[in-house]
Amino acid sequence: MRVRRHAALDAGSYAGSAVFALVVAGFASIPLYREWGRVAVGPYTAGAAAAAFLAIRGAPSRARIWLALLVLAGAALLPLGLEVAWRARTSPGQHVQAEAIVTEEAAKALVHGRDPYAVTYLHGPLADRPLGTKTHFPYLPGMIAFGLPRALAGDRPIADARVWFAVATLAIGGTALAMARSPAGNRLRAFQWLVVLPTGALLMATGGDDLPVLGLMLLAVVLAGQERPLGAGIALGIAAATKQTAWILVPFLVATVALANGRRTAAKLAGAAAAVVLPVIATFTAWNPGAFWEDAVRFPLGLGRQQTSAATPTLGSLVVHAFPEARTGVTIALIGVVAILVAYLLVRRPPTSVAGAASRAAAVFAVGFVFAPAARFGYVVYPIELLVWASLIASQGTTSRRAVG
């Protein structure tokens, strides 16, 4: 009965994804998203039909795994391969989102001895993009690693940053889920949300920079749930050195460890993370403090000299647009709302388990997205993934739910 129920849930997930892909194909404002939708709707529809058949037959869980891999191939890897091939045959600025291009251009700047945060990208593949995109590298230094293949190997398809975003995500996320002590059905569900369903597949084919960060955060959560503070701290540190979004998980994991296992163990996790992230960030900050502050802090928050191209409508963006003359003050106030929520959850509702840490981080991400002055579709994925991981860790049992020791 349980096997049938899981397969039926798969059928519903793939059917919903097919509807989403169809809507994206017809109405998305970004051409690259529409191309993904047209390719992905078929695999999702076939996956829904196959999952319904498995539900009727009561097929074993191994069949669900194979089906998920097939849907992954059709809805994520196939669109990714097509977009990479089309890009190689046309302009390097086409068939790819700006986040992948700017990562590659930042890596090229670094390889040639220039500060990625101080240079501008007015020419080349970003020439037709908005001014803010051409004059800022808005990520943390770890992201540059994914652009190095193109910086070193040229415009070959295999060097596309999205390929390496995908490789890292599948390798890190797959390792994390293989290590998890949760039931196979829960691990498969987490895999689906990470890379098979549109929460992962759409990003993988178009931009994908959030996916390896999510994979590292998942690995940190799994390792924390298995009482491995050093490994959890290293994974969290790499994520935090790659993109600012990973920082929201840090205080909740550290607080969980401190409450469950004492400050010394919390210091072990925090120290491992700091040992990774601080030298990386300090190196680039020392290179040009003003450029780093502008690109990695002010610009992503919507406070930079130019406007960010992140244009997903949020309550925060509506307020900022309603009071453009008070943009800085309004933005700081909105950030303050999120900071107050973090402080409230840490002080008044502190997490006592890794699952609780993940769910509280999800709540902050959701509120942060609503109040963000500038946001992208990819940010929606974070609270969803964190809630899935909370369920994953909670299913490991009372022994594994302890934080770390």
Image: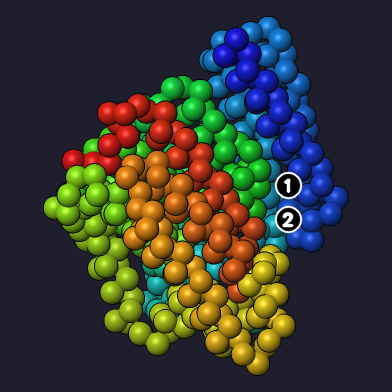
Task: Say whether residue 43 is visible.
Answer: no
Task: Give the vertical position of 9 relative to 338 (above or below).
Answer: above
Q: Residue at 51% of width from left, 35% of height from top?
A: 190
Q: Mark 2 points at which residue?
A: 32
Q: What percent of the width, then of the height, locates residue 90?
A: 71, 59
Q: Residue furthest front?
A: 348
Horizontal placement of 227 versus 62: left or right? left
Task: Say whether residue 265 is visible.
Answer: yes
Q: Residues within 10 Å of mark 1 (few under 14, many from 20)?
A: many
Which amino acid type is shown beneath numbered disc 2? Leu
Horizontal placement of 148 versus 80: left or right? left
In-front residue for pair 78/227: 227
Chosen colour scheme: rainbow
Task: Give the vertical position of 93 relative to 203 (above or below).
Answer: below
- Give me the disc on residue 229: none
Q: What percent of the width, then of the height, locates residue 298?
A: 49, 80
Q: Identify the secondary structure beneath mark 1.
A: helix
Indicate the quadrant where residue 14 lies: top right
Q: Residues within 10 Å of mark 2 (few under 14, many from 20)?
A: many
Image quadrant where one finds the C terminus: top left
| Circles 1 and 2 in contact, beta carbons < 8 Å | yes
Q: Which residue lies furthest to the right in this view?
A: 26
In-front residue for pair 62/372: 372
Q: Residue at 34% of width from left, 60% of height from top?
A: 347
Q: Mark 1 points at which residue?
A: 36
Q: Distance between the residues labelled 1 and 2?
A: 6 Å
Q: What percent of the width, then of the height, locates residue 189?
A: 54, 30
Task: Give the vertical position of 288 relative to 148 (above or below).
Answer: below
Q: Residue at 17% of width from left, 49% of height from top?
A: 262
Which amino acid type is shown beneath numbered disc 1? Trp
